[in-house]
Image (tube, rainbow, N blue to C red):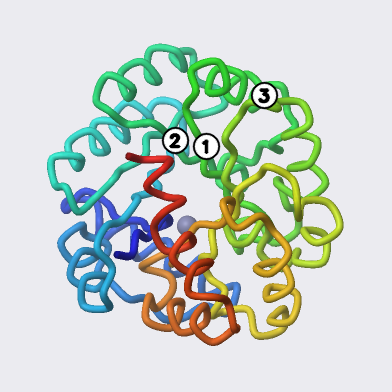
Amino acid sequence: MIIDFHTHCFPDTLAPRAMESLKKTFATGGFTKVYTDGTAASAKEALSKNGIDRAVVCNIATNAHQEHKVNDFAIALKADPFFYPLGSVHPDSERVEEELSRLAEAGIKGIKLHPDYVRVPITDPRMDRILSALEARGMFCVMHAGYDPISPDRIHATPEMLRETIDRHPNLTLIAAHMGGFAQARGVLEHLVGTNIYFDTSLCSLRPDEREELIEILNRHGEDRLLFGTDTPWSDSKAEIEFLEGVGLSRERLERIYCKNAQRLIG
Ligand SMILES: [Zn+2]
């Protein structure tokens, strides 16, 4: 059983436009291939083909007035048991509590935040307010971490900032995407390995320069704090599985990464 804790898809009517604009952004970072057409059906097909049984969908509200619709999409997508959609809220939202209640009532236990898309550092009070609300409710947060081509000159979630955040919110279940920080593996080893933060493994296959550090993180971080992820459509799920299979982890550790840890979070 493999659960992919980091995927993206969009409502059918928005998918072509969303993919067009996101592809341009990703190309500026040197990522030129995509693996779905952006729709849920295409994600399901691409992931199933590579042996993935279930996908967590990381929806992102990139502005405050759109967040309600993003959460409508998440709640609707939950009807398909292949998907476990996450909600999202925006740092400028005046309806954080209402949206979180709506998600919780629909059985959605977590949200995704992308600080680079909203240009707000995770240590900003507006982010902190959201994280406090999640902590109080026992909901989890998947946080983009490290470099993203949308904001090449400023990283809004560095390993240092993530460390500050988990120290301030000891009961928050925080999942730092991309092994704790894309292009930040050294900082992750210094500040985050061994803490209670979760990492998802998405995009490892696209980080040949950091391969040694990524393997060190996989070996040193708590085995109950690692979640398999791909970041479909931006990475090939087959290559992401091959990366993990090729780094010498025990079968038992891999099983936790592929599904047991995720099951504990999403049921
Ligand atoms: Zn992503």
Gap in angstroms between the C-alphas marked 1 and 3:
12 Å
* Residue pointed to by mark 2: 111
Q: Residue 95 is drawn in which quadrant?
A: top left
Pick the front one: 197 or 62 = 197
* Residue pointed to by mark 3: 128
* SS at mark 1 in the image: strand
Amino acid at pointer 3: Asp
* SS at mark 3 in the image: helix
Question: What residue is at 43 percent from the left and 78 percent from the top?
Answer: 241
Which is more N-terminal, label 2 or label 3? 2
Provide residue 112's location: percent of width, then percent of height. 47, 41
Pick the front one: 181 or 1 = 1
* SS at mark 2 in the image: strand
* Residue pointed to by mark 1: 141
Provide residue 224's location: percent of width, then percent of height. 56, 52
Which is more N-terminal, label 1 or label 2? 2
Gap in angstroms between the C-alphas marked 3 and 2:
14 Å
Gap in angstroms between the C-alphas marked 2 and 1:
5 Å
Q: Is mark 1 within 8 Å of ligand 1?
A: no
